[in-house]
Amino acid sequence: MPNLVQDIYDSYIADLNHKKMSSRYAGKEQWFHSSGSGKCIRKHYLDTIQRVPVEDRDPIPKTTYRLFRLGDLMHEDIQTAVTLHAQQEGLPIFIEKELFLEDLNVRGFIDLAFVDKDILYDIKTMNSRSWSMTFGTKYGKGISKFNQMQLGTYGLWYQREYKTLKGLSLAFYNKDTSVMREAELSLDVVDDAQEYWEKVKRMTSGDKPPPIAMRSSPVEDWECGYCNLLTACGGGVKPSLLRKKK
């Protein structure tokens, strides 16, 4: 029984994921996911409009689910710490606040917001390679546009709901080194997010999914290599990126 503990843990994670999906998404499959902000528009169509069934999707590797779980644990820990701080200081906050942008058909959950300061935070965990790509002086490309667009989407909702927004910040956690870093975003990403979701709604309103074309479906060619709708999509822009099924 060489993989007994691993198999038990994978089964545990699968059960947690099933419960999370059931509580968060069952009955609300018609909404676009804020976590897909800025990404492949064709995927939004297949996921939300066409609603490709689970059995027709490419399997997600168990290692990926373990990484997701690690990220969830770090989110929960940080959110618990902030909640305790807010209770002690009497501060109004949001933790995992559900949001709806009904005209854009978008739904999501805000990680963290200090309501009295009108500042929203999104928590991002990453490995050292991704950290270097984000903050490194030699190969760093800066903060992911997708991360910015996701927080911009939350900001769009907050701005509409509260008529004011003073700050958007990403809180990064390096899983390999435990180093943390915060990065404030320009509020311009709110307008960028609105333009993106207007484009998504426009391009998914027809009878057929948007054509495979760079800069929209997908936005970046590497997205296809991490997409569990790749087969249903028809192979994406680079069939060689198709992950090995596990």
Image (spheres, grey):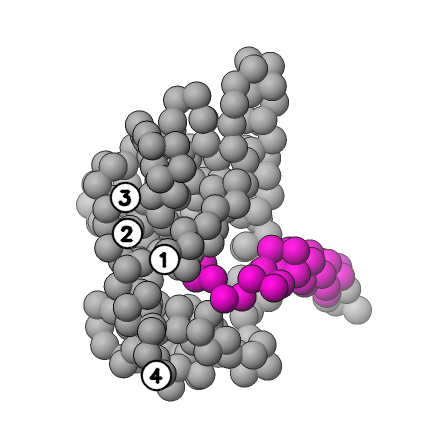
The residue that mark 1 highlights is 104
Relative image position of residue 148 (x, y in whole percent):
31, 46
In whole angstroms, how far apart are the C-alphas of marks 1 and 4? 19 Å
Q: Is residue 161 left or right of residue 80?
A: left
Residue at which label 2 appears: 194
User: Who's the residue at 41% across and 59% down the image?
Assistant: 105
Q: Quadrant of the N terminus?
A: bottom right
- Discs 2, 1 touching: Cβ within 8 Å: yes
Q: Residue 208, labelled with which disc?
A: 4
Residue 129, image x and y in percent? 36, 50
Amino acid type at image mark 3: Val
Q: Earlier in the sequence, mark 3 or mark 1?
A: 1
Q: Secondary structure at mark 1?
A: loop
| Highlighted range, magenta | 5-33
Of pointers 4 and 2, the one earlier in the residue sequence: 2
Q: Position of residue 176 (x, y in %)?
A: 47, 43
Q: Main secondary structure of the magenta part?
A: helix
- Packing grade of label 3 (10 A; few <14, some 14-19, many >=20) is many
Give the distance between the C-alpha atoms of the residues marked 3 and 1, in whole angstroms. 14 Å
Mark 2 and mark 3 residues within 8 Å of each other at the beta carbon: yes
Name the foreground residue: 125 vs 168: 168
Say what amino acid the circle numbered 2 marks: Gln
Is residue 200 shown above or below 46? above
The residue beneath circle 3 is 190
**Mark 2 or mark 1, earlier in chain:** 1
Of all residues, the one furthest to the right in this rendering is 1
Classify mark 2: residues with Cα within 10 Å, few (<14), some (14-19) or many (20+): many
Helix, strand, or loop for circle 4? loop
Depth check: 73 or 42 in front?
Answer: 42
